[in-house]
Image: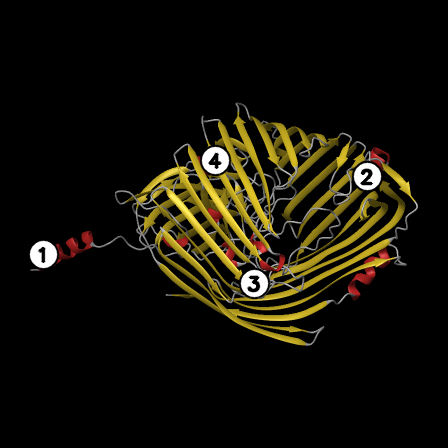
Amino acid sequence: MRLACLFTLVLCAMAAPALAVDIDGRIDAAEWQGARHITDFRKVQPLTGEPASLRTEAWLLATPEGLAVAFRCDQPPGVPRTPQRVQRDFEDQVDRVNLMVDFDGTGRTGYNFVVSSTGGINDAVITNESNFSKDWDSTWQHAVSEDAAGWTVEMLIPWYIAPMHASRDGKRTLGIYLDRVTGSSGERDAWPAASFKRPRFLSEFERVEVPAYSQSLLAVTPYVSGLYDNVRGRRHFQEGADILWKPSGQFQLTAALNPDFGQVESDDLVVNFGATETYVSDKRPFFTENQGIFDFSLLDDNSQLIYTRRVGALADDGHGAADINAAIKLNGSVGGTSYGVIAADEDGEAGRFFGAARVTHDFGVQSLGAMLTRVDRPWLDRHATVVGVDHHWQPTAKLTVATNAVASDILQHGTHTRGSGGTVLADYEMADGWRQQWLGMHFGDRLEVNDFGYLERNNFNYAHWELRKRNTSLSPDSAYSSHDWHFRIDALDNDHGLRLRRQLRVSRSSNLRNGANEDVQLNLNSAAWDDLLTRGHGAVFLPPSLALAYDRSSPRHGDWAFELDAEMYSGGLSGNRRLGYDVKFIPTYFISDAFSIYAGPYYEHTPDWLVWQRDNLIGSFDQHTLQLNAGFDWSIDDRQELRLKLQAIGLDARLRDAYRVGGDGRAVASADDVDDFSVRNLGLQIRYRYELAPLSYLYAVYGRGGYALDEDYPYRTGGVFGNTFSLRDDEQLLVKLSYRFDI
């Protein structure tokens, strides 16, 4: 009888499901039984492919609850550790591990999950092989433990976290990349030995076949917020909800009802007198969730067909930000085809309707996509339609080609305006660290994508050839571990053949053995024309100019870290006869591992600063700017943080000469009255955040700011800067409570 009972228990044990992984930061051999064990970590920073200096082990296991990953990082007492606590979406150079997953294994979209040795996290979406966006936040499990010999991390990534194609025969092929960064040296050790500094990154992830599991999620995040405007004596209360429904990886829906898109994240202050718009990233949850499918880069800096900061921006009547009634987004896949649809409707007569549809299909070494956007702006009697097609091709193991074509149709006051453009980018990776890149762009003067998208300017043709060389064979005695040299020549004309730039660029990006990073760049510009300065009232001819920039950031050593940026440049109508410069130095002092304070100045002197006045009148100013960046970060405990961010700018511009731009583009001295002016700008935010549960927060935010443009201001730069602190255009207290219910 006892033998029968024992036999039954053995059979039950054999038939029982595998032990679920307990994410507690301690690797239990029984829990990780059957996991893929990975030990072949190689140096990718510096990018040598040599075995890692410190031993790192990882375990990878697909479970019904999600993708489980564990890291064991050896770090003996002789290797300094970075003990500081970091906030979510940190960029600090600290000890950390990265798990990156391409859930379809196609190389189109990846997700990065970062955990520091002190338990801080960061998550991001990866598109276009190596473009990381930290605006996305999601919920996943993680835990860390530490001992004298090293530290351990465990993660669990639920299957509903991202859209994914349907599985085949009960199996799913993932793209996996794992790495470990040693903060004190900056060394990055990875499996496989892929690098985001090479033309291909996502495509080089290791393909891993796992059992196909599926999870569903219904999450509702109601919120309530109250704002008190202390300047105008007004109160405003608002409530709404975000809804996230993921019945499977093949269909996911996000909706926002009466969404609160008020900023609890403060943007950096920018003083912009130029003709082009400043790009600002977006942290609003509705626009970051499942947004990867909508990435349609025009391959020109931050250019996109969908720039989500347009939604809820300044209303078309110019009277404040637009309120949003509702927004909805859905995406999914059918076979190898992925799709996405997004729509948002603003309130009031000056509100707009935004809509977009996106589809992509993977053909192995090629992928093809298309996007259609539509914006209706009744206040302006304007309807904007944009269509784009993009293609990615890897014809050989070394050559990567990306192309896109876009067209716009703007109907305003009964008249159609149509324009088009396109880009071709080719990257060729050669032997011994050499790499070439060719880029060609054409954007017609009638192309308009900025109703929903972002393009710094249209009306140009651009081409460049770039040669790169990576050097990792440096002496062990050198302070540097690697150099990446870039040599570029480029040509920029407008669409009517006017020369806007001819440039030779030489730059070097370096990693130091103490974990610091350093960048040096020299630009030599030929004489050319500026066709934007006068806002359509004639192009102005500018003589040759140059710019030499130096940037260095150093991680924490002892109680200090610092960032240093410096630049020397010429320009304006003086060309190389007058030199300007700017310097920024921001040291950070760590009072403790949880509390750091930073404060540093930025000073700029531009001796020939050209500012448009009206029609073809421009002013040349001797400009001085003094800026303060200061604040502190306090991680009170695992759930609470307090942050202060202060920026103050004082700009003083004294007139040198006034000019009219002649018909031949030459600037001619003018007797027109042009005044000296000063700019004061202030931004202060004190933010307390308490994490009630994953993605559930209580915020208390105090903000104060102001902007003043003063003509004939009696003070010089120091006085202008000092009077910045008296600005009080806005003073607000915001309290916001949101709580996510997973159903």
Q: Name the residue under label 4.
A: 391
Within 10 Å of the Cα at label 1, are there few (<14), some (14-19), or many (20+) other Cα atoms?
A: few
Q: Name the residue under label 2.
A: 572
Mark 3 or mark 1, whichever is nearer to me: 3
Report the side of 73 relative to 19 (left or right).
right
Q: What element carries label 4?
A: strand
Q: Distance between the residues labelled 3 and 4?
A: 34 Å
Q: Distance between the residues labelled 1 and 4?
A: 67 Å
Q: Can residue 472 be seen in this view?
A: no
Q: Name the residue under label 1.
A: 3
Position above or below: 326 against 583: below
Q: Is mark 2 on a helix, strand or loop?
A: helix
Give the percent coordinates (x, y) of residue 470.
59, 29
Q: What residue type is labelled 3?
A: Phe
Within 10 Å of the Cα at label 4, are there few (<14), some (14-19), or many (20+) other Cα atoms?
A: some
Q: Name the residue under label 3.
A: 261
Q: How many labels does the image show?
A: 4
Position above or below: 5 against 126: below
Which sits earlier in the primary sequence, circle 3 or circle 4?
A: 3
Give the residue drawn at x 53%, y 37%: 405
Give the percent coordinates (x, y) of residue 410.
58, 47
Which sits earlier in the primary sequence, circle 1 or circle 4?
A: 1
Q: Quadrant of residue 140?
A: bottom left
Q: In which quarter of the image is residue 1?
A: bottom left
Q: Distance between the residues labelled 4 and 2?
A: 40 Å
Mark 1 or mark 4, whichever is nearer to me: 4
Q: How far apart are marks 2 and 1 (CA)?
A: 94 Å
